[in-house]
């Protein structure tokens, strides 16, 4: 009887499972097609924007006086991603127009960063900014060395204040032998 019921169960539910499987497969295929369409649209949009940016970059380079655009070295770069000469330009624009908001939008920087540049580097040339950054770096290294030496000094003081327990000394006879040799 049990075998008979299992056969009926599979005969009745088999077509239902096959139909559900087909429907699920169709839904997955439709979802994948939608995903591919969205992906293609995004790729075409991004590539179009990249082409426009490339054209704008070429126009900008043509407007510049005979000056080669080269990537600044890592030592010339600020954490904001600007080179020293660019920071100097930001500060000079702010000093000319006193409009921090415009400079922030123009250089695509947060207002706080522009204010920091103005506070730190106002009136400096790119070489002075570079030297200032070198001095800041040297100062931070010296502070770190000072902290390390103070920590070492505290450790040495702690060690000098520790009492040597008698069990660490091997024996009086062994010490007597050392004192005779020392004489």
Image (spheres, grey):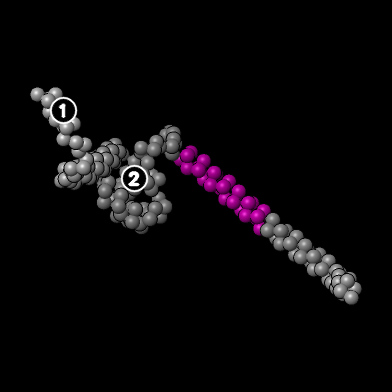
Question: Is 41 part of what is drawn in magenta?
Answer: yes
Left or right: 4 with respect to 77? right
- Label 2 sits on a secondary structure element that is helix
**Of residues 135 and 27, which is closer to you in this image?**
27
Question: Is 108 part of what is drawn in magenta?
Answer: no
- Residue 102 is situated, as x and y percent measured from the top left of the image, at 37, 56
> Given the current orientation, which residue lies at the most extreme front position?
173
- Residue 93 is situated, as x and y percent measured from the top left of the image, at 33, 49
Q: Which mark is residue 87?
A: 2
* Viewer can see residue 162: yes
- Residue 135 is situated, as x and y percent measured from the top left of the image, at 25, 39
**Of residues 48 and 35, which is closer to you in this image?**
35
The vertical placement of 96 against 67, above or below, is below
Q: Which residue is mark 1?
A: 177
**Of residues 28 and 130, which is closer to you in this image?**
28
Residue occupying the point 65% across, 55% down: 39
Query: Which span is picked out in magenta?
Result: 38-63
The C terminus lies in quadrant? top left
- Residue 107 is situated, as x and y percent measured from the top left of the image, at 40, 50
Mark 2 nearby-residue class (10 Å; few <14, some 14–19, many ≥20): many
Q: Main secondary structure of the magenta part?
A: helix
Residue occupying the point 40% across, 55% down: 105
Residue occupying the point 18% across, 31% down: 174
Q: Choose top left, top right, bottom left or bottom right for residue 128.
A: top left
Q: Earlier in the sequence, mark 2 or mark 1?
A: 2
Left or right: 49 with respect to 115? right
Residue occupying the point 64% across, 51% down: 44
- Mark 2 to mark 1: distance in Å? 73 Å
* Viewer can see residue 86: no
> Given the current orientation, which residue lies at the most extreme left position?
183
Q: Which mark is residue 51?
A: none
């Amino acid at each position: 009887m049990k075998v008979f019921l299992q056969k009926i169960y599979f005969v009745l539910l088999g077509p239902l499972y096959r139909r559900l499987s087909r429907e699920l497969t169709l839904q997955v295929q439709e979802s994948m097609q939608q995903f591919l369409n969205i992906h293609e649209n995004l790729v075409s949009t991004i590539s179009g924007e990249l082409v426009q940016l490339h054209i704008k970059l070429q126009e900008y380079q043509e407007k510049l006086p005979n000056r080669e655009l080269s990537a600044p070295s890592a030592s010339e770069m600020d954490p904001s991603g600007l080179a020293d000469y660019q920071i100097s330009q930001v500060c000079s624009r702010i000093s000319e127009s006193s409009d921090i908001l415009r400079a922030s939008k123009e250089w695509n920087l947060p207002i706080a960063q522009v204010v920091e540049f103005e506070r730190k580097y106002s009136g400096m040339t790119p070489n002075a900014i570079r030297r200032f950054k070198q001095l800041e770096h040297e100062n931070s290294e010296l502070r770190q060395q000072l902290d390390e030496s103070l920590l070492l000094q505290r450790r040495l003081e702690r060690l000098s204040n520790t009492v040597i327990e008698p069990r660490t000394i091997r024996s009086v006879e062994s010490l007597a032998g050392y004192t005779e040799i020392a004489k």
